[in-house]
Image (cartoon, grey):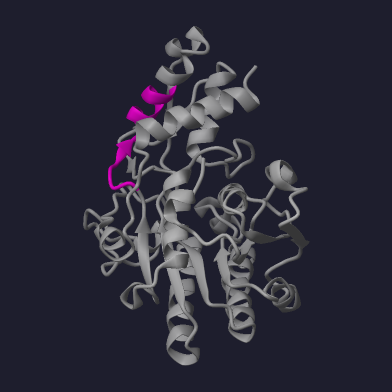
Amino acid sequence: MSIKPFHLKSDLHILVTGGAGFIGSNLCEALLENGNKVTCLDNFATGKRENLTAFANDAKFTLLEGDIRNLADCQKACEGVDYILHQAALGSVPRSINDPITSNHVNVSGFLNMLVAARDAKVKRMVYAASSSTYGDSTSMPKVEEVIGKPLSPYAITKYVNELYADVFAKTYGIETIGLRYFNVFGRKQDPNGAYAAVIPKFVMQLMAHESPVVNGDGSFSRDFTYIDNVIQMNVRAMTTTNPEAVNTVYNTAYGERTDLKELVALLKEYLSSYDSKIAGIETIYGPQRAGDVPHSLASIDKAKNLLGYDPQFDIKTGLKEAVDWYWEHLGQ
């Protein structure tokens, strides 16, 4: 895994907030592979130290333990930084429904702190993790960046507020921002444990343990599942674009195809059964729908292709195969 094909300069200093998380740690690793200096800011609320193990002793890597809810921590992290890849957030629709106050503190107040710190440190650009949840109750398909609906969860509200704040800071203070609306990102290092685990690693762990995966609803809900290396590419392209029309806006970050949950489980069983033949016969359990869930999600990636030159290399099958291989190697029996 390498981002060298994107011709990224190797003498940049990049801050990755939430750098111990799933997406953040993959970004840190890719940037360090390219020879860049990377600072990771994380409070380890959801990030994991083991995600940093592979590069923790790299001379170009600095770990700052801190919280984006603390402006002083943000200011310290931004010292001498060229670019920010802001991944720190409390994800999960159900988590935000259970505890909207904490989600708001982290995702809104923390985001505002980062914008202020970036502005004051004269950082060149802040690329931030936005969310496909912003499309809310919009029924249009595929999702295009300029057409959104009303948010369906506190989490969706916080991520939309991020976009509004970024837009205001661009217009008021001249700071460059780009938001990446992530669509169901998956891949290596994604946590399979906990109440708010994402669906793919959760299903993988259930199947490896010979347990029936539990699908919310009848399995017809569909998502634009997006492999982590496509997301790394988008972050690098957003960070380094020199096209003035490409900044101070938002982009769908996806593959541009959708897969329903029934098909997802079938693919996982197929790939995992090459390691353990018993997995092929495991039944799926269908449960109640989850509050705040959007039935279908499919991104148009035309804007990212046209303005950033985005060219995703991993479709659902290629990405799932790589993810399954990683999980079996690291977490298999």
Residue sitting farthest toward the bottom = 172
Q: Residue at x 43, y 31 (%)?
A: 320
Q: Residue at x 57, y 52 (%)?
A: 34
Q: In the rendered image, which quarter is residue 262 located in?
A: top left
The residue lying toward the viewer, choosing from 114 and 31, is: 31
Q: Residue at x 51, y 40 (%)?
A: 1
User: Quarter of the image containing the C terminus?
Assistant: top right
Q: Which residues are magenta?
A: 255-268
Give how far across and how far down residue 272 sits, in percent: 48, 19
Q: In the image, is residue 284 above or below residue 124?
A: above
The residue lying toward the viewer, choosing from 86 and 215, is: 86
Residue 262 part of the magenta segment: yes
Q: In the image, is residue 125 above or below residue 309?
A: below
Instruction: Report whether residue 224 is seen.
Output: yes
Q: Is residue 20 left or right of residue 27?
A: right
Q: In the image, is residue 200 above or below residue 13?
A: above
Instruction: Report whether residue 261 is seen.
Output: no
Q: In the rendered image, which quarter is residue 303 located in?
A: bottom left
Q: In the image, is residue 186 above or below residue 291?
A: above
Give how far across and how far down residue 122 sits, in percent: 59, 83
Give how far across and how far down residue 101 sits, in percent: 62, 67
Q: Is residue 117 left or right of residue 245?
A: right
